[in-house]
Amino acid sequence: MRTRIQYSRASLLAPLIVASFLGISGIAASARNDKPPASNNPKWNYEEIKNAPEKARLKQNPLENDPEAVRAGGKLFERNCSGCHGMKAEGGRRAPSLLREEVQQATPGALFWVLTNGAVWHGMPVWSKLPEPERWQIVTFLKSYKPSLTPGGPGGG
Ligand code: HEC
């Protein structure tokens, strides 16, 4: 009989305990929504560009000075890349900016290599299904954002 009485006392306290627990977890849940935006995902480190083997890095872009390639590459970028990298390659929640030094200083060959191989474990798809000329068009387009990156030394041409 004694245990019975003790049990009913406990059942009076139980709703209070539950209520205070819900209150605390409610506060914790609202704090969790204050995360900073994912645009600076530390996982995006532009490492893949550096992984391009030398032979690939030094490959010449056959469409380097082709103004038509900039236009065509822009369209291809809009269709295939802007969903993650943003309409102006400025980056977003799903992928990093492509206007950063790491990308703009990369050789055309290195960018071509990244497109061909992707970085799938980091969320960057493989684009080998695009014909090679289309991949070069995209590279030409990306490079067209900052056409004169080479430091203007004497007799630069
Ligand atoms: C599904 C989303 C997605 C799409 C679509 C996408 N990318 Fe990416 N891209 C990423 C992510 C995520 C990274 C970061 C990978 C990393 O950290 O290595 C990345 C990285 C890159 C890089 C830098 C490589 C590096 O070393 O990180 C380049 C250049 C690039 N993308 C170009 C493109 C181009 C050009 C297209 C269109 C043909 C494209 N991406 C389409 C998600 C995407």
Image (cartoon, rainbow, N blue to C red):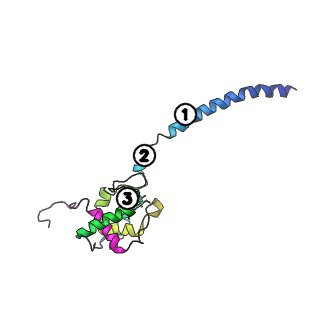
**Residue 66 image position (x, y, % from top left):** 23, 70
Q: Is residue 83 above or below residue 136?
A: above
User: Magenta part of the protein: which range?
Assistant: 127-152
Frontmost of labels 3 and 2 is 3
Give the left or right position of residue 67, taking residue 87 as reference: left
Q: Residues within 10 Å of mark 1 (few under 14, many from 20)?
A: few
| Mark found first going from the N terminus, 1 or 2 | 1
Marks 1 and 3: CB-CB under 8 Å?
A: no
Q: Which quarter shows the N terminus?
A: top right
Residue type for callout 1: Ile
Give the left or right position of residue 148, taking residue 136 as reference: left
Q: Residue at x 55, y 38 (%)?
A: 29
Which numbered dot is residue 27? 1
Judge by depth and name the residue closer to the eye, 141 or 53: 141
Marks 1 and 2: CB-CB under 8 Å?
A: no
Judge by depth and name the residue closer to the eye, 76 or 34: 76
Residue type for callout 3: Ser
Give yes or no for residue 157 being in the magenta stretch.
no
Q: Residue at x 45, y 59 (%)?
A: 122
Q: How many marks?
A: 3
**Residue 43 image position (x, y, % from top left):** 43, 54
**Residue 93 image position (x, y, % from top left):** 42, 51
Q: Is residue 83 above or below residue 130?
A: above
Spatial CA span between label 1 and label 3: 37 Å
Give yes or no for residue 148 being in the magenta stretch.
yes
Which residue bears the numbered disc 3?
A: 82
Disc 2 secondary structure class: loop
Q: Is residue 4 above or below residue 127?
A: above
**Residue 50 image position (x, y, % from top left):** 36, 64
Give the left or right position of residue 20, taking residue 127 as reference: right
